[in-house]
Amino acid sequence: MLTRPAGLALIAAGLAATVLVAVPLARFPEATPVALLAVAPFRIPVGLGDEEAFLLLPLYLVLAGSVLAFAYSILRGAAPPNVPRLLGLPLAAFVAFAAVSYLWTQDERQGGIVLAFFVFPFVAGFGVVARTPIVAWVPRALVVTLVALGALFAGIGIWQAHTRTLFFARDLEVANAYTTFFRVTSLFKDPSLYGRYLVVPIALLLVLLWLRRGRPLEWVAIAAVSGFLFLGLYFSYSQSSFVALFVVTFAIALVGAGKRLRIVLVSCAVAATLAAAGVAAQAVEGQSAKEITSGRSRLVEITLDAFRVNPAVGVGFGGQAEASAEANGRRNSRRSASHTTPLTVLAELGVAGFALYGWLLGAAGWALMLVTRRRRVLGLGLAAIFLVLFVHSLLYAGFFEDPLTWGVLGLAAAALSAVGSSSVPERLAH
């Protein structure tokens, strides 16, 4: 490709586009998080060998431009703040261990794709966003951008449900032919990924609903947009997305409630859980665990089989599906992916990597709490998004492959860096 005229022209066009993106970001660096968010969800199908991969090409372009703009500012003598050690240390440790594990991964191709197209670019994005000043208009612009993207995806999803049309989901087209309902994906390849990008803006709007108490006009507008997003979410029929929505809604209600109301909420949640468990027990009586969990119990079992191959340091980044397939005598590794981030980390990075994963999650939670103490709206919004991503990753995976995860961590780091050096949160963060 590098020696062919078409390849050279494509590279030249990419470099020119990167410079064009870098120029305004160098002049207005505070717009970097908004620019990255605006293109973060869009995945373009690209042929990689004998299969089709959905890569974040628009994000790569803006990310390259933001890195170039950041480098230019350094050359001109700018002195951006350091990344708080509270987040920087666990993140660096986890990424370094994941990268080193490529030396022994059982699937070099998949591990290389995840590292080269997701983890490494997102680390660069985290580094840039973490050093970006968060001026007053940035949080509002981020909310508007995220809600606008959600409305776009929901509108397309509703249209797909009405017209029975799909864009990037050939496998789902076959599945829809054998069901009484029609699942949609909007501009995504998977209903659950589509659902994730609707639950995130809904969670933000729920935070705003709680913060805007006593303002009926704003309540009506926020409720109307939330209802539209939920309608789009409904047609995804994504169990993982609805679970994430329930958890984040309950968490927001719990944070905003008084002591007595919290007791009522917890009591109702426990009662509802017990009632649902009773109804589910009757509905699934006589069925196997595989049937009850829609095959997820089997995925848990074969993922644990991969973990047993090398419990200490795992089978290497990206190697879980291949290791599970080999351990169970299967040829197709695609059907052996665990679809849950914690188990994937445990199998691929072993006990050592899982400990680093836990350290990173704990540090992220503590950082978000510190941000909330100083900038309540920003902190609660970031915490709600992070909770959605974490809960969703328990049932769908894709935690570290989603740019939103790294964006939340980057914004939290930027907010901590902006705290005065004499404050308690700053001392705790550093």
Image: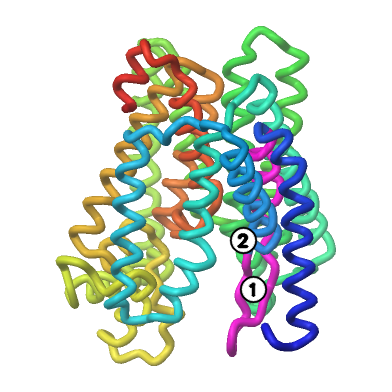
* 385 is higher (above) or lower (below) than 57: above
Left or right of 282 on screen, residue 223: right
Choose top left, top right, bottom left or bottom right for residue 285. Answer: bottom left
Secondary structure, mark 2, is: helix
The answer to whether residue 116 is visible is yes
Q: Which residue is mark 1?
A: 172
Residue at the farthest top position: 214
What is the basis of the colouring in this image?
A: rainbow
Q: Disc 1, disc 2: CB below 8 Å? A: yes
Residue sitting at 27 percent across and 68 percent down?
Answer: 347
**Residue 288 in sight from this viewpoint:** no
Residue 234 image offset from top left, x and y in percent: 65, 50
Q: Of the residues shown, which amino acid type is indicated by label 1?
A: Leu
Tag 2: amino acid? Pro
Look at the image and tell me in which quarter the C terminus lies.
top left
Mark 1 and mark 2: Cα distance apart in space: 9 Å
Front-lying residue, 145 or 82: 82
Q: Considering only order in the chain, which callout, 2 or 1, is on the residue closer to the N terminus?
A: 1
Q: Image point 55% across, 47% down: which residue? A: 404
Residue name at image x 35 percent, y 76 percent: 319
Which dot marks residue 6?
none
Residue that badge 2 annotates: 191
- What quarter of the picture does the N terminus occupy? bottom right
Tell which of 306 and 426 is nearer to you: 426
Magenta stretch contains residue 51: yes
In the figure, is residue 350 to the left or right of 172?
left
The percent coordinates of residue 91 (x first, y second) are 36, 47
- Residue 272 lies in quadrant: top left
Q: Report the magenta residues as a range.
A: 31-55
